[in-house]
Amino acid sequence: MGSALGFLPKISIIIPSFNQALFLTKALDSLAQQEYPHLEVIVVDGASTDGTVELLKARADLVTHWVSKPDAGQTNALNKGFALASGQIFSWLNCDERYRPRALHLVGETFAQHPELDMVFGHRIVVDTGGREIKRMKTPALHPRNYALFASGLLFSDATFWTAELHRRTGQLDEVNCRRYAMDVDWFARLGLQVKKWQLLDAYLSEFTEHEQRVSHNVPKMAEITRHIRRRVMLLAGVGPLRVILYSPLYFILSRYGRFGWRGLLKPPRPTTIFRFAGLIK
């Protein structure tokens, strides 16, 4: 990948899309404003009828590859996109997300300086549909594996970047159990199991738009889906319920401190939370 700042790695950004032309416009604008020299933008659209195709044709200067065909959901679209990606660094950006100014330069420079890294991640800002800031969300400086296993923590897809080699080690996103929902919960947990070297960037890399139409607002049986994901990840990691019970209080506290500072310590984890993490209760 190179270690000199003069060589920035190629970053491949996958954008899954379906009838989100208004949001997609803003996401693409944020990519164009990065002015990152080695950027691959791949949009996989599920046959939208809202002007998305016309938008993609008009942004041929920015979008490297795009397809607009019926698919089996967001997870399938992401796998299609990553199969086309040729960069050394991967990430995905949903239509209702966008990168903060120079975020990709910061990411690229970090990977260039530290070619041993598997993953780099940062913080996120939540905004409303008018672009007004609602809140800031910090990611704690925890190994992604421990964050997922013992604090039930989810990295932000729009503020997380990983190597193509790490992606190959992990495999594909799960199109069977997470066809439309919770694919990020499953993916970043499994991805974290493979991470050896990582770095938290203490910077807000992205903005996420809070809106009523987003998919996760109306997900049936989400708790059941996430429980299934946790059981599988614990099995893959070789971590049993007892270990989760022992380790979770520490990592929960570290996570709260990393996200909220000292005020995060005012709310210690409840025993029911720990037992739920361990899969012993619902």
Image: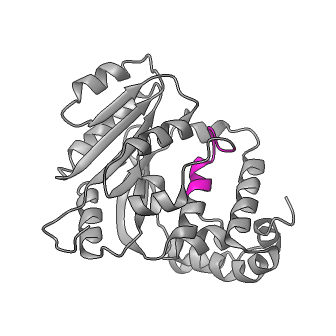
Q: Quadrant of residue 238?
A: bottom right
Instruction: Give the quarter of the image for residue 186.
Output: bottom right
Q: Residue at x 39, y 43 (%)?
A: 14
User: Residue 128 in the image: x percent, y percent?
Assistant: 44, 42
The residue depicted at 41 percent of the width and 18 percent of the height is 50
User: Residue 234 lies in magenta, yes or no?
Assistant: no
Quarter of the image where the C terminus is located: bottom right
Furthest-left residue in this view: 6
Q: Position of residue 58 (x, y in %)?
A: 23, 24
- The answer to whether residue 62 is seen in the rendering is yes
Residue 92 lies, in percent from the top left, at: 42, 48
x 46%, y 24%: residue: 19
55 w.r.t. 232: above or below: above
Front residue of this view, candidates 132 and 95: 95
Evaluate whether residue 161 shows in this view.
no
Instruction: Tell me if residue 182 is in the magenta stretch.
Output: yes
101 is higher (above) or lower (below) than 112: above
> Seen in the image, is 48 located left or right of residue 238?
left
Q: Does 205 sit above or below residue 53?
A: below
Which residue lies at the image location 29% right of the left edge and 69% below the top edge?
Answer: 111
**How many numbered discs?**
0
Magenta residue span = 177-187
Quadrant assignment for the N terminus: bottom left
Give the colouring mode of the picture. Answer: one colour
